[in-house]
Image (cartoon, coloured by chain):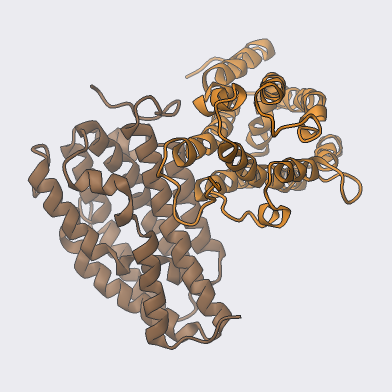
Chain colours: A orange, B brown
Amino acid sequence: MSALLSPEELERRLREVGEARYHDKHPFHARLHSGQCSKGEVQAWALNRFTYQAHIPVKDAYLIARANDPALRRAWRQRLVDHDGDHDGEGGIERWLRLCESLGLARADVQAHRGVLPATRFAVEAYVNFVRERPLLEAVASSLTELFSPKIIRNRVEGMLAHYDFVSPESLSYFTARPEQARRDVETALGYVTVHARTPAEQQAVIAALEFKCDVLWAMLDALHHAYVAPGHVPPGAFVPVP
Amino acid sequence: MSALLSPEELERRLREVGEARYHDKHPFHARLHSGQCSKGEVQAWALNRFTYQAHIPVKDAYLIARANDPALRRAWRQRLVDHDGDHDGEGGIERWLRLCESLGLARADVQAHRGVLPATRFAVEAYVNFVRERPLLEAVASSLTELFSPKIIRNRVEGMLAHYDFVSPESLSYFTARPEQARRDVETALGYVTVHARTPAEQQAVIAALEFKCDVLWAMLDALHHAYVAPGHVPPGAFVPVP
């Protein structure tokens, strides 16, 4: 039986989860950021990650639908704005599509999730269903990987611009706004779990929710690494880079 | 726009899906059946596959819950009997647990899905949700991988007995009954989709459902292969074989 943690101690435990399990520790990211990826690997990463990006407002809408508190719904609504924008051609999903296009992928293929790894789809679906079905506290906690995203984004942008001649600052515009948005989002979510995890069991559930979310991100990179870094493992029907 | 297929042509198309995508084509199975796996790899296979086995009656119960036809429910009910038995200590899940124990895994760890790869959980959850949420026709069609299972089971049993001194005929008792059960089950399911897929679109949906199910099985082996065959890729928190 665990003891009740102070808010500071809970945050420290959450940060430990990130130290151990956030996907910045995955070998594929080291490869991506240090210029070791082929263009086909970068394409496969962007294509598969689009499936994740495209479902973020879906999971956020499920969370809003389940929140009884107008203040939480209002705060969370900003995430829909960030990803979907206010008009056609705006928002994070559109910017991710442009990244895919700048890498030579056809917009319609990406939007249709054509060639996306089944393992990516399964992981993203597990995340959406987690937010839809688990207690609201855990659904909120599963967003806390954003505690760790500003650092990985900084490394990614610097690394990709330095190492790939097919990557331009414009193509990475998705990432420009993300660190500030993540800092704001994480303040809401961390504040929420600190106040609402009132028992040791609830605090452990919050920690487990963050571990689950780290597993989702890790599994997506495992699938990419297996299919595209080790040759000969692209599963039937998935994207095959043009040599 | 596809044409309406005859029942024979539909079955031929379904068998083509198996030729291209069933997991007997996966390199991990070649490895497992030809004696190239370490004991730790065989343990990891059995442990992860248990998570799949344990959810089979769950997905079958969802299918029964959605079937309005007593005859279909009755036929499908036999699957519950096969996996859960009539008494404690019987049924396919119990036999799979004994296989895990015979390989040196602790029953309680296996039953708790401890150390199972997140990618396995996500794939199994995707399968259960597919059966729960997609049209009944597609849910039935997703079981049709059993068209291809008698052959893989024969190869597996012969290969594992020939190549691993830690595998005995008793430990493989799960597989004894399966080919006959699969033949009976597939007769029901194939008969159902042949009668109920009445439009070209429905026939294409049946084929796609079988492709989806093949993707589930393939993704499970990809995850195993990545984590346990290539060294150094076991994800955080997953089963680590004792050297």
Q: Return the residue nearer the eye: B31 or A31.
A: A31
Q: In this view, does A223 lie above or below A111?
A: above
Q: Position of residue B210 (x, y in %)?
A: 44, 66
Is residue B65 in sight in this rendering? Answer: no
- Determine the residue positioned at 54% across, 38% down: A220
Residue B227 falls left or right of residue A168: left
Examine the image and state in which quarter residue B189 appears.
Answer: bottom left
Q: Residue at x 22, y 65 (%)?
A: B150
Question: Residue A30 location, x and y as percent?
Answer: 55, 22
Residue located farthest toward the right when viewing the structure as drawn: A87
* Closest to the observer, A105 or B171: A105
The image position of residue B65, as x and y in percent, is 48, 68
Front residue of A82 and B25:
B25
Query: Is B129 rendered above or below residue B148?
Result: above
Residue B75 visible to an observer of this rendering: yes
| Number of marks drawn | 0
Which image quadrant for residue B224?
Answer: top left
Q: Position of residue A123 (x, y in %)?
A: 54, 43
**Position of residue A55 in the picture relative to residue B118 (left or right):** right
Side (left or right) of B185 relative to B215: left
Task: Say if A192 sits above or below A239 in the image.
Answer: above
Q: In this view, does A225 lie to the left or right of A48?
A: left
Quadrant for residue B3, please give it. Answer: bottom right
